[in-house]
Amino acid sequence: SPLARLHSLSLSAVVPCMYEHHKSFDVIQAKHVGTGHSDTTKYEWATQHHRDSVASTVGHYDMLSYAAVAQNDAVQRVRHELLERMLQPCGPPPQREDEEEA
């Protein structure tokens, strides 16, 4: 019947598509550091998120000048403060469980 043929065609089209999706996702994770993985901690994810946001602000002059006007400060001073904040954007890293036992 046409309906059974349509169902079998759609299933055969979905399986390779799912494989390609997982394959491309693995490539993206290997290529870009901030995409995370199953072992990414909350601290690591937040740190990457903050660094990406600060890098975007510093990289786009309009956003940087907007932040400078909002803070009533010079553009270069705001840039310097943002770049310093990139070192530890979420504070010092938490102690790991294996370090606490030792």
Image (cartoon, rainbow, N blue to C red):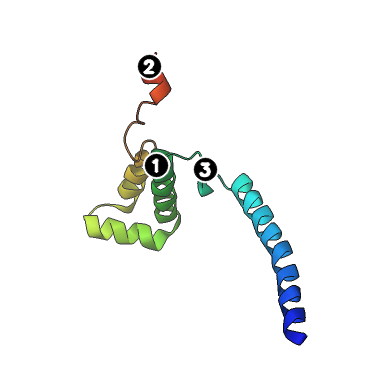
Q: Which residue is mark 2?
A: 101
Q: Secondary structure at mark 3?
A: loop
* Mark 3 residue type: Ser
Contact between labelled residues 3 and 1, with CB atoms less than 8 Å apart:
no
In three-dimensional space, the C-alpha distance between marks 2 and 1, rounded to whole angstroms, equals: 21 Å
* Mark 1 residue type: Lys
> Which quarter of the figure is the N terminus placed in?
bottom right
Please rate how many residues cluster around mark 3, counting C-alpha atoms within 10 Å: few if below 14, some from 14 to 19, many from 20: few
**Image point (71%, 77%), residue name:** 7
Above or below: residue 62 compared with residue 92: below
Q: Secondary structure at mark 2?
A: helix
Q: Nearer the viewer, mark 1 or mark 3?
A: 3
Q: Earlier in the sequence, mark 2 or mark 1?
A: 1
Q: Which residue is mark 1?
A: 42
> Which quarter of the figure is the C terminus placed in?
top left
* Mark drawn on residue 27: none
Q: Find residue 97 and report its image quarter.
A: top left
Q: Secondary structure at mark 1?
A: helix
- Image coords of residue 87 (percent x, y): 39, 36
Above or below: residue 74 compared with residue 99: below
Q: Which residue is mark 3?
A: 38
Q: Nearer the viewer, mark 2 or mark 1?
A: 2
- Image coords of residue 8 (percent x, y): 75, 74
Contact between labelled residues 2 and 3, with CB atoms less than 8 Å apart:
no
Contact between labelled residues 1 and 2, with CB atoms less than 8 Å apart:
no
Please rate how many residues cluster around mark 1, counting C-alpha atoms within 10 Å: few if below 14, some from 14 to 19, many from 20: few
In three-dimensional space, the C-alpha distance between marks 1 and 3, rounded to whole angstroms, equals: 11 Å
Please rate how many residues cluster around mark 2, counting C-alpha atoms within 10 Å: few if below 14, some from 14 to 19, many from 20: few
Q: Earlier in the sequence, mark 3 or mark 2?
A: 3
In three-dimensional space, the C-alpha distance between marks 3 and 2, rounded to whole angstroms, equals: 24 Å
**Image point (52%, 43%), residue name:** 38
- Image coords of residue 11 (percent x, y): 71, 70
